Image (tube, helix red, strand yellow):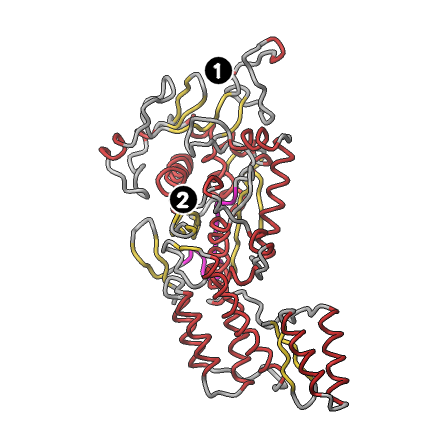
């Protein structure tokens, strides 16, 4: 029985989906204005693990993720510059080129970490009509007001606004910005639609020296502009999971409550709180049942930052000579709700552990003929660990218990295959051996046949220097990465 920590209730709950066999899951995706670093990717590996755990429990998972390519302001709220425009200026490219470039970097990172694809990957710029439609419903129901820079959601008209964040009124006042947009009624009110130019009116950019034309803007009932960040997730999650929009018009009857919504803990106070407010105000239905939030990753005890020189991507990990799967293995060792501290030393230790595990698996496979036998007691123990709010560190320890047990190789392999479906380490994927290493192994075999063991040992050392170990068996040598 799967149990998850639900941020909404601040407790671990038994997971019960809306439908018996199918789970609806929405994940806040990347804002593609810059590189996705290993802290971001830890969260997406966590979502992947959650999806795999759900499948292990017999559920079909409908998982939708958004790509934010417009509307996410640098403050994560309703003021400042659009991150996409900032990225375009930084890299000297168009907003569209920047979005494509960094979406590809994100997708490449997902592939390297063996993160399974979402059923749907939705781009904010493809769902402008749906976002406008949702704002229109909020306007009809009296939840919005207009000021010079956009259309805003009035949080005072949504009594349960802090249900997720659990912030008190005095905390909200203490955390309010010193300066608010002129005309904004409350510090917590947020933008649904931002105007490209004051009051949303059209104008001739060429005639206005003080105007910098936005590269992304659209017509709307309120004026030319672009959607706020929060509205995209409400509109796209409902459309992606329930197909409730027709030509921008929402059909509330098609909407059900989303089972699981995931994101980083930094999304709780503003982004996810605002998603709930606008979705529930518009539909009259509970937006999400279970909120799953992942904690941060630090590097050597400090926040990751380019200015500190500790900003790393998956590609950086590879350039340093590490297997990207060692990073996934390292992620598994810290609970998703705990802050993780990354060091290169810890990654090196993780890689050694993963290599040893692969070596064990390879040895088992060489000595078995089928995967039919399994160790049920260890599988139950493994399932109990992952169903306990995804305790992956404990699950990994069960894997090593299997390795160290006295069961047969065939039984070990049968159960490890089941466990690896959740871990996602692809332990049973055949490793590609470089041609140069294969040539040296073949030469070494020739020397062994000639009983020239001195040259054979010299080649073994040369092979080892290239990162591979040779294990001689009765039939043939086995090549294993060190």
State which tag comes first along the sequence, 1 or 2: 1
Of 402 and 375, nearer the camera is 402
Of 90 and 244, nearer the camera is 90
Disc 1 on helix, strand or loop? Answer: helix
The range drawn in magenta is: 17-30
Of 202 and 319, nearer the camera is 319
Height in image: 86 above or below 295?
A: above
Whether residue 292 can be seen here: no
Residue 368 figure quarter: bottom right
Disc 2 on helix, strand or loop? Answer: loop
Residue 11 covered by magenta stretch: no
Of 85 and 300, nearer the camera is 300
The label number, if any, that marks residue 198 in the structure image:
1
Q: Which residue is mark 2?
A: 287
Q: Looking at the rendering, in which quadrant would you find the C terminus? A: bottom right
User: Would residue 113 be found to the left or right of residue 164 on screen?
Assistant: right
- The residue sitting at the top extreme is 207
Q: Position of residue 315 (x, y in %)?
A: 59, 51
Height in image: 257 above or below 75?
A: below
Q: Position of residue 472 (x, y in %)?
A: 65, 85
Q: Residues within 10 Å of mark 1 (few under 14, many from 20)?
A: some
Q: Residue at x 51, y 78 (%)?
A: 415
- The residue sitting at the left extreme is 170
Q: Position of residue 369 (x, y in %)?
A: 63, 86
Q: Residue at x 69, y 70 (%)?
A: 433
Q: Position of residue 325 (x, y in %)?
A: 55, 62
Q: Looking at the rendering, in which quadrant would you find the N terminus? A: bottom left
Height in image: 342 above or below 266?
A: below
Whether residue 361 can be seen here: yes
The label number, if any, that marks residue 33 in the structure image:
none
Alpha carbon separation for disc pair 1 and 2: 33 Å
Height in image: 468 above or below 171?
A: below
């Amino acid at each position: 029985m799967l149990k998850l920590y639900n941020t909404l209730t601040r407790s671990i709950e038994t997971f019960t989906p809306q439908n018996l066999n199918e789970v609806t899951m929405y994940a806040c995706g990347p804002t593609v204005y810059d590189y996705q670093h290993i802290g971001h990717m830890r969260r997406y590996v966590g979502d992947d693990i959650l999806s795999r755990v759900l499948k292990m429990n017999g559920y079909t998972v409908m998982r939708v993720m958004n790509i934010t390519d417009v509307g996410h302001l640098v403050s994560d709220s309703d003021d400042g510059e659009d991150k996409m425009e900032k990225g375009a200026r930084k890299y000297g490219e168009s907003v569209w080129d920047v979005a494509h470039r960094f979406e590809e970097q994100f997708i490449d990172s997902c592939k390297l970490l063996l993160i399974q694809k979402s059923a749907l990957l939705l781009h904010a710029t493809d769902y402008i009509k749906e976002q406008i439609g949702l704002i229109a419903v909020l306007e009809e129901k009296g939840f919005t007001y207009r000021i010079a820079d956009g259309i805003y959601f009035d949080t005072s008209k949504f009594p349960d606004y802090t249900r997720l964040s659990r912030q008190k009124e005095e905390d909200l006042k203490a955390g309010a910005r010193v300066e608010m947009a002129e005309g904004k009624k409350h510090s917590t009110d947020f933008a649904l639609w931002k105007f490209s130019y004051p009051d949303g009116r059209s104008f001739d950019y060429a005639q206005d020296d003080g105007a910098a034309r936005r590269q992304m803007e659209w017509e709307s009932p309120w004026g030319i502009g672009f959607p706020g960040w929060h509205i995209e997730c409400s509109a796209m999650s409902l459309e992606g999971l329930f197909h409730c929009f027709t030509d921008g018009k929402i059909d509330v009857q098609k909407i059900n409550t989303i089972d699981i919504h995931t994101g980083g803990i930094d999304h709780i106070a503003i982004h996810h709180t605002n998603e709930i407010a606008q979705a529930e105000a518009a539909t009259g239905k509970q937006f999400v049942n279970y909120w799953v939030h992942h904690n941060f990753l630090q590097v050597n005890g400090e926040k990751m930052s380019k200015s500190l020189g500790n900003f790393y991507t998956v590609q950086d990990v590879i350039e340093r000579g590490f297997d990207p799967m060692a990073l996934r293995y390292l992620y598994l060792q810290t609970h998703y709700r705990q802050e993780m501290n990354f060091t290169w030393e810890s990654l090196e230790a993780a890689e050694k552990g993963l290599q040893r595990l692969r070596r064990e698996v390879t040895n088992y496979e060489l000595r078995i003929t089928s995967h039919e036998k399994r160790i049920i007691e260890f599988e139950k123990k493994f399932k109990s660990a992952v169903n306990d709010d995804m305790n992956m560190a404990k699950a990994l320890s069960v894997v090593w218990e299997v390795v160290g047990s006295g069961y047969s190789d065939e039984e070990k392999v049968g159960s490890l295959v089941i466990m690896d479906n959740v871990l996602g380490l692809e332990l049973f994927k055949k490793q590609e051996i470089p041609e140069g290493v294969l040539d040296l192994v073949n030469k070494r075999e020739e020397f062994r046949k000639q009983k020239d063991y001195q040259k054979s040992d010299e080649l073994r050392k040369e092979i080892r220097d290239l990162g591979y170990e040779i294990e001689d068996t009765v039939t043939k040598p086995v090549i294993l990465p060190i």
